[in-house]
Image (cartoon, rainbow, N blue to C red):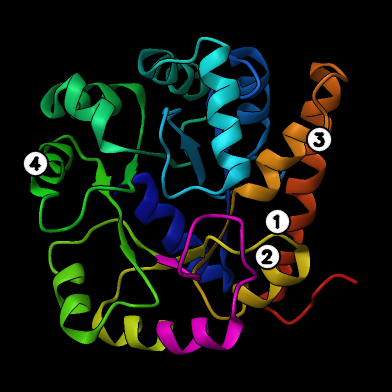
C-alpha cells in the first residue's frame, strides 16, 4: 500500500482530517526550506505539499508567486527539489510528499524521466496545476507505472458530467479548489464546499482535500469537519515572507508555530473539540 493510501486509511480510522501544509522548495533558500520541511511532520503535518518553483505560477496568488521568485533567486531547481526529498526520506519513511507545480518544466525534463526520478527521490504524488484531465495521460501513465499518483482537481464550476470524467482513472486523492480564482485571495465558502463534497463523495470513494482559501485555525477547523484534508499554503509562505531578514532560526520557528496551530485545529475539529 502506498504512503498516501496508508496515511488516509489511518486518518479515517482515527476519525480526523489530514492537515496538509504547502511550502515552496528553496524559499527563502534551500537550507532554510529543508529545515522547515524536515520538521513539518513533528509540527502536525500528515501530508506535505512541496512546491516546485516556477517563473509563471498562474494559479497562485501573490504570496505563493513571491515564494517562487525567492526560491528561484536562491538557486532552486528541479534536481535540487528531488535531492531535498531524498534527504528528507533518509529520516522520514512514512510522511507522504506531493510535489505541486506546472507542466512546462516537467515537459522540458521529459515525463518518463521525471516520473522515474520523482519516484526514486521518494515522492508519492504530483499536482500539476495546468495539466487538464484531457491531456494528463502523458504524465499520469508513466507516473502510475512508478507508483506515483497524479492528483486531479475538482472546482466550484465542475458539473456532473465532468466530475464523472475526473474520478475515472483518478488515484491518490482529489483536491477540491474551494474558490474560483487563484490561491490565497478569497475566504473559503464553507456551505458551498460542504455541498460540493457531498457530490464528490457520491461519485468516488477517493479522499478529497480542500484548499485555496484557508488561512486561519478557525477556517481549518470548519473545513476539517466536512473534508478528508485541509490544505494551507498562502498563509504559511506568507509567514516566511513576514520574517525575512530575521535569520533562518526565526523563519523556521515562525512557520512551525503556525503549522502547529493549524494542525491542532484540523485534528481536533473532526471530534468537535475546536481549540479556543
Q: Is residue 53 left or right of residue 189?
A: left
Element at label 4:
helix
CA gap, disc 3 to disc 4? Answer: 39 Å
Q: Which residue is mark 2?
A: 266
Image point (68%, 65%), residue name: 266
For the residues carrying marks 1 and 4, which lies nearer the camera in this image? 4
Question: Which-is-in-front pick, marks 3 and 2?
Answer: 3
Residue at the image position 73 percent from the left and 57 percent from the top: 262
The secondary element bearing badge 3 is classed as: helix
Q: Is residue 156 magenta?
A: no
User: Going from the N terminus, do you reach mark 3 or mark 2 first?
Assistant: 3
Residue beneath label 3, please? 242
Alpha-carbon span between mark 4 and mark 2 = 35 Å
- Crowding around mark 1 (Cα neighbors within 10 Å: few <14, some 14 to 19, many 20+) is many
Q: Mark 3 and mark 1 in contact (Cβ < 8 Å)?
A: no
Q: Name the residue beneath numbered marker 4.
A: 138
| Residue 65 position in % (x across, y down) | 54, 37
Q: CA distance from mark 1 to mark 2?
A: 5 Å
Residue 65 drawn above or below residue 131: above
Give the Cα separation between the discs numbered 1 and 4. Answer: 35 Å
Is label 1 in contact with label 2 (beta carbons under 8 Å)? yes
Q: Is residue 59 left or right of residue 261?
A: left
Which quadrant does the C terminus fall into?
Answer: bottom right
Cα–Cα gap, marks 1 and 3: 20 Å
Whether tag 4 and tag 2 are in contact, CB under 8 A, the answer is no
Task: Specify whether 80 is left or right of 36.
Answer: left
Q: Residue at x 28, y 48 (%)?
A: 130
Name the mark nearer the viewer: 1 or 3.
3
Q: Is residue 42 visible?
A: no
Query: Hey, which quadrant is residue 123 in on the image?
Result: top left
The magenta segment is: 176-196
The image shows residue 226 at horizontal and vertical percentages of 55, 80
Amino acid at each position: 500500500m502506498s504512503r498516501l493510501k496508508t496515511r488516509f486509511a489511518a486518518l479515517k480510522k482515527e476519525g480526523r482530517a489530514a492537515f496538509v501544509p504547502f511550502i515552496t522548495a528553496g524559499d527563502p533558500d534551500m537550507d532554510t526550506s529543508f529545515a522547515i520541511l524536515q520538521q513539518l511532520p513533528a509540527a502536525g503535518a500528515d501530508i506535505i505539499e512541496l512546491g516546485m518553483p516556477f517563473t509563471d505560477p498562474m494559479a497562485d496568488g501573490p504570496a505563493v508567486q513571491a515564494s517562487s521568485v525567492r526560491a528561484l533567486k536562491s538557486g532552486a531547481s528541479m534536481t535540487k527539489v528531488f535531492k531535498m526529498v531524498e534527504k528528507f526520506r533518509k529520516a522520514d519513511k512514512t510522511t507522504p510528499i506531493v510535489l505541486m507545480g506546472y507542466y512546462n518544466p516537467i515537459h522540458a525534463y521529459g515525463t518518463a524521466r521525471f516520473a522515474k526520478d520523482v519516484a526514486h527521490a521518494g515522492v508519492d504524488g504530483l499536482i500539476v496545476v495546468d495539466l487538464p484531465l484531457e491531456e494528463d495521460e502523458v504524465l499520469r501513465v508513466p507516473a502510475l507505472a512508478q507508483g506515483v499518483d497524479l492528483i486531479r482537481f475538482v472546482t466550484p464550476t465542475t458539473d456532473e458530467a465532468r466530475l464523472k470524467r475526473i474520478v475515472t482513472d483518478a488515484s491518490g486523492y482529489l483536491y477540491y479548489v474551494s474558490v474560483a480564482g487563484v490561491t490565497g485571495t478569497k475566504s473559503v465558502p464553507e456551505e458551498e464546499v460542504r455541498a460540493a463534497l457531498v457530490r464528490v463523495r457520491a461519485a468516488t470513494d477517493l479522499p478529497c482535500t480542500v484548499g485555496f482559501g484557508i488561512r486561519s485555525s478557525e477556517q481549518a477547523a470548519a473545513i476539517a469537519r466536512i473534508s478528508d484534508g485541509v490544505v494551507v499554503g498562502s498563509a504559511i509562505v506568507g509567514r516566511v515572507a513576514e520574517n525575512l531578514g530575521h535569520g533562518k532560526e526565526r523563519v523556521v520557528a515562525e512557520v512551525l508555530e503556525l503549522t502547529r496551530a493549524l494542525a491542532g485545529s484540523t485534528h481536533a475539529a473532526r471530534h468537535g473539540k475546536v481549540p479556543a
